[in-house]
Image (cartoon, rainbow, N blue to C red):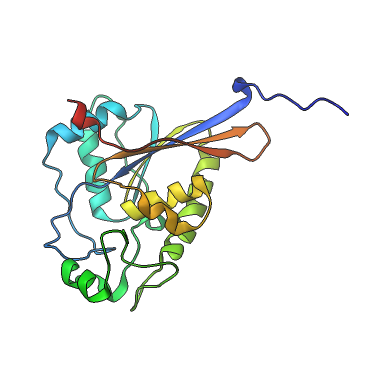
């Protein structure tokens, strides 16, 4: 029997995904899901800290919702000399979970009516789909997010990819890295403007694996 091949570090292609959740949304206490609301990018300290951590030479993408686009623009504005200018591709596949008829409802009253407790972590349970036009389950969200991650990983292998998107989208990416039932990722806290780093490691010519670098990093807390 021949000895197993040894893969050296130099033979591994590493693609690093820097996931950033959008800035806080003044939502009036209502569920927003895919409602296209503005976010609050006024905290200059937060954006300077995040800009300092993110790599300069990176591919940028966002979801198609304006709160993600506004957050990306605020990070660029916090360090204009560091990041290249130009249009940032926006992908609807990276949008937050569509919560159908629940969008616009008062959040506390909704949770009380549905018996959602603090340890449920999410609006839907298991494969439950939100009612009404466009309503999605969490597995629906995962099913549209993960193919685009695979596609962009292949297109930009070996690069840094900065993706400004949403809490649900980032949890879907974490689920792709971890494997197992999608809802297990609900336990992760993903704060506004926090950074989650996922690394895709692929030996040349072989299928890659995922490594989790950090989750919910808030660099402004160290300032």
Quadrant where the N terminus is found in the figure:
top right
Residue 215, picture quadrant: top left
Total marks shown come to 0
Most extreme residue toward the right is 1
- Does any portion of residue 78 appear in the rendered image? no
In this orientation, which residue lies closer to the viewer: 171 or 161?
171
Rendering coords of residue 188 (x, y %)? 35, 48
- Does any portion of residue 31 appear in the rendered image? yes
Residue at (17% x, 67% y) in the render: 108
Residue at (24% x, 34% y) in the render: 76
Question: In the rendered image of this protein, does residue 114 appear above or below residue 36?
Answer: below
In this orientation, which residue lies closer to the viewer: 138 or 119?
119
Rendering coords of residue 214 (x, y %)? 38, 35
In this orientation, which residue lies closer to the viewer: 143 or 38?
143
Residue at (31% x, 66% y) in the render: 123
- Residue 37 vs residue 14: left or right? left
- Residue 15 vs residue 85: left or right? right
Quadrant where the C terminus is found in the figure:
top left
In this orientation, which residue lies closer to the viewer: 116 or 156?
116
Residue 43, picture quadrant: top left
Rendering coords of residue 187 (x, y %)? 36, 52
Rendering coords of residue 129 (x, y %)? 40, 73
């Amino acid at each position: 029997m021949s000895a197993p091949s040894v893969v050296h570090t130099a033979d591994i292609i590493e693609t690093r995904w820097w996931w950033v959740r959008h800035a806080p949304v003044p939502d009036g206490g209502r569920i927003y899901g895919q409602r296209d609301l503005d976010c609050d990018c006024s905290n200059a300290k937060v954006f300077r800290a995040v800009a300092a951590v993110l790599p300069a030479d990176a591919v940028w993408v966002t979801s198609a919702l304006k709160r993600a686009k506004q957050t990306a623009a605020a990070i660029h504005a916090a360090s204009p000399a560091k990041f290249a200018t130009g249009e940032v591709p926006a992908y609807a596949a990276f949008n937050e979970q569509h919560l159908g008829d629940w969008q616009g409802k008062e959040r506390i009253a909704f949770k009380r009516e549905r018996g959602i407790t603090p340890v449920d972590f999410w609006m839907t349970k298991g494969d439950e789909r939100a009612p009404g036009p466009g309503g999605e389950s969490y597995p629906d969200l995962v099913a549209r997010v993960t193919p685009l991650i695979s596609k962009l990983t292949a297109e930009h292998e070996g690069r840094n990819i900065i993706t400004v998107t949403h809490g649900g989208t980032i949890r879907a990416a974490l689920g792709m890295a971890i494997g197992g039932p999608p809802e297990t990722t609900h336990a992760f806290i993903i704060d506004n403007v926090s950074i989650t780093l996922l690394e895709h490691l692929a030996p040349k010519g072989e299928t890659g694996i995922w490594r989790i670098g950090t989750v919910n990093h808030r660099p402004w807390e160290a300032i």
